Amino acid sequence: MIRYLFIFFLLIFISGCVAPNFENKKVIVNNNLSMALRTNNFDKVKQLISKNNINQKDNYGYTPLHIAARYNYIELAKYLLNNNLTKIDEKDDFKDTALLDAIKSKYIDMTKILICKGANINIKDKFNLSTKDYIKKIDNEFLLELINSDNKELLCKENEALHTKINALTSKDDEKINQDKKDLTIRKKDLISVDNYTSINNKKPKICGDLIDLNVKKIILSLKDKTYNAKIKGNTWCAKIDDKLDNGSYSLSVMASYDDYQDIKQEDISIYVLDDLYKDLYNQIKVELPVWNATFDENNLEITFKNKKSFFYEDKIKTDFKIILDQFIPKYISVIKKYEDQIVNVIIVSNEKVSKDEGNIASAEKVYQYLKNIKSSIISSNVMWIEKNIFPEELKSSEVQNMNKIIFKIEVTKK
């Protein structure tokens, strides 16, 4: 009997020793991970982190991401955020998320990274304040733009691209890198403006604007995950969209920069080209277009007449072009009149100057005056409509031309 009692107590003693050993081992691992996180020992963290402890909290309710955010360990935070198991909006015992910890410490880059990775900016702390409230307090221009943007993903990509480009430019010289890292801070500044576009009648539009700061050397336009380099001339810039767009609404972003200054402008545009009008008009004139040496652009409803020499002789329209206008204008008016409730204007422009003393609007004016007097029942019965809706305008392009052009452009709006 005594023997059995001895064995029983021995087992209890052994089990009591073993259990704490396992528990102690767990505590040691957790302490090691916590220590590695707090000392920013990246290699050790990667060694110790696992799917079982990536969201594990310490005595203060801090997850590994909380610790990275509180200590502003950027690379460590990126590593944790790249793991899909990381709970980005987990709260600690003080009711703070990692994002709230970062913004309260005014860690701008950490805050940007967390927002760009999808952290919730509307979660409130124990003081009933959200990340948005704290950002407004510190008044950081980029973060303010980021939280108010309808396209945070695009803004994040552009900012990351700029950082990548800067790093690439400085990576050739280690000594220069170290100096640049000390001095480099992206500063927000109004560098450009974007022209106001409500509705664009061109499926391959050109987006333009002005330079506010003439030091700008690089402007990039982003639209639908594609980028386009803008051309700068004088105090203006333009970017041509080479990819055909469908009718609809789009958000574009334009980024200008020089040195450590950056400016990002966002604009909403609407593309609308009356496709049915194009089909009707093209069917009417498709046979004559090559004979007239003319083209019809379906992307912007522009009909362009070309002449290597001149459309004019001694300030008057040449006879051969008068014959072309006599054939073209009645067909043109008969078709576009059917869409009059959607036509805002028809603009006539020319790049040819009739004389040295007059601008190119004078040549467009002569074409306009001639077309109103063409002997045709279609013209005579629609003179009032023509005078209200068709106008000559000056062509503002300053590009050198090797071909004289007269262009008819239709501006339309949605019903």
Image: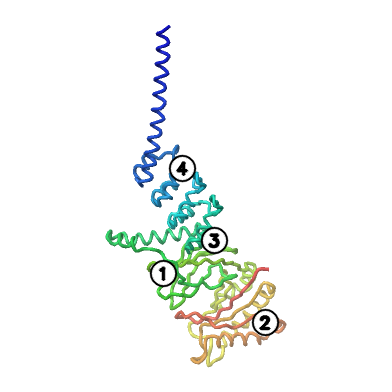
Left or right: residue 123 compared with residue 105: right
Residue under label 1, please give it.
218
Where residue 171 appears, as percent x and y from the top left, is 31, 59
Q: Secondary structure at mark 2?
A: helix
| Cα distance between the residues tagged 4 and 1 | 48 Å
- Sequence-wise, the earlier of marks 4 and 3 is 4
Give the residue type that dot 3 points to.
Asn
In space, the residues marked 4 and 2 are separated at their CA atoms by 75 Å
Mark 4 vs 2, N-terminal side: 4
**Residue 49 placement: quadrant:** top left
Q: Earlier in the sequence, mark 3 or mark 1?
A: 3
Could you say where residue 134 lies in the image, as x and y percent from the top left? 51, 57
Looking at the image, is mark 4 or mark 1 nearer the viewer?
A: 4
Mark 3 closeness class: few <14, some 14–19, many ≥20 residues within 10 Å? few
Q: Secondary structure at mark 3?
A: helix
- Please tell me whether mark 4 or mark 3 is closer to you in this view: 4
Along the viewing direction, whichever of 120 and 66 lies nearer the viewer: 66
The location of residue 53, given as percent across then percent down, is 44, 38
For label 4, the residue is 60
Front position among marks 3 and 2:
3
Work out whether mark 3 precedes mark 2 in sequence or the reverse, and give the earlier one.
3
Q: Amino acid at mark 4?
A: Tyr
Which residue in the structure is indicated by mark 2?
388
Q: Which mark is residue 148?
A: 3
Whole-number angstrom distance, CA of label 3 to CA of label 1:
25 Å
Marked residue nearer the N-terminal end (4 or 1): 4
Mark sitting earlier along the chain (1/2): 1
Amino acid under label 1?
A: Lys
How many other residues sit within 10 Å of disc 4, few (<14), some (14-19) or many (≥20)? few
| Element class at badge 4 | loop
